[in-house]
Image (cartoon, rainbow, N blue to C red):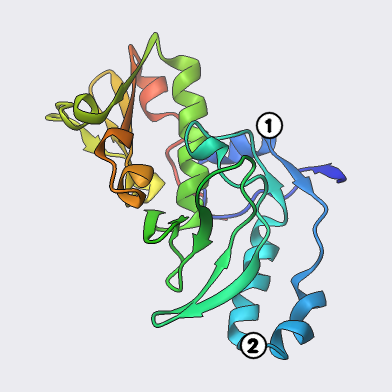
Amino acid sequence: MNLNLVNDVPAGLTRRARSFVSAHGVKADVRPVEGHRQWWLERDVPAEVIDRMAAFQQQWNGLLLPPGPQYEGGPKYLDPDSPEADSTGWWFEPGAPRASVAYGFLISPSGEFGIHTDRWVPLHASTEGWVESVALAHHASRWAKQVTRLTGDDADGLDLRGFEPVDEVRGRADTWWRGPDSLVALYSGEAEAFDFPEGRVAMVYSGLDAWGLRAGVGADEG
């Protein structure tokens, strides 16, 4: 697999995420979606679904990031495949898992990024949210004076009074919260997917200054 530097960071990300993608991301050579169009059309995949996948590929173009802290790191690189339908519409994979996990990653008909076992669990409202979450975890772990991992009841009992949601991660099952001197990531995807409350994880990044809490929050206007 050939890897290339990232010269065109996708739009719609914060400065923090753009910096993370530029500094730590690479792009894998991927086969264009258009090369599979006729094959999928012959198998009754609607043209508009293939168009969605082509747009996804054009935006992310095989982006490979350092592994995220949960879900065994997330997709290895972002490249759409395997369109399939259910009663709600058409879904596709955003990329193959980088490790052996008991679920797959999917993009929903409405664009949510999540995991699927016997049930669907949206993690973020968009792929941008996933990228923001990975970037924020990297940022917080670098600047925090202390990192604490809580699971199960300890994660559920975390007191978040005085915290505000970190909107850029577009959280669904997974959310981030900003307090006076700390950031908290709550990962509930596996707990919901397997109906296993003990699988809930909270990561508390404490001892952050103003830079650590808010650096690069401005949205990309270009």
Residue 138 vertical position relative to residue 175 in the rendered view, above or below = above
Decide if residue 16 is in sight here: no
Cβ–Cβ below 8 Å for labels 1 and 2? no
Image coordinates of residue 74 in percent, x first then y, are 56, 43
Q: Quadrant of the C terminus?
A: bottom right
Q: CA distance from mark 1 to mark 2?
A: 36 Å
Image coordinates of residue 120 in percent, x first then y, are 39, 61
Residue 36 vertical position relative to residue 222 in the rendered view, above or below = below
What element does badge 1 sit on? helix
Which residue is drawn at the image coordinates 28% and 33% (left, top)?
Answer: 198
- Callout 1 amino acid: Ala
Decide if residue 98 is in sight here: yes
Image coordinates of residue 110 in percent, x first then y, are 42, 71
What element does badge 2 sit on? helix
Q: Which residue is mark 2?
A: 47
Viewed as shown, does residue 205 lie left or right of 36?
Answer: left
Lower sequence index among marks 1 and 2? 1
Image coordinates of residue 9 in percent, x first then y, are 66, 48
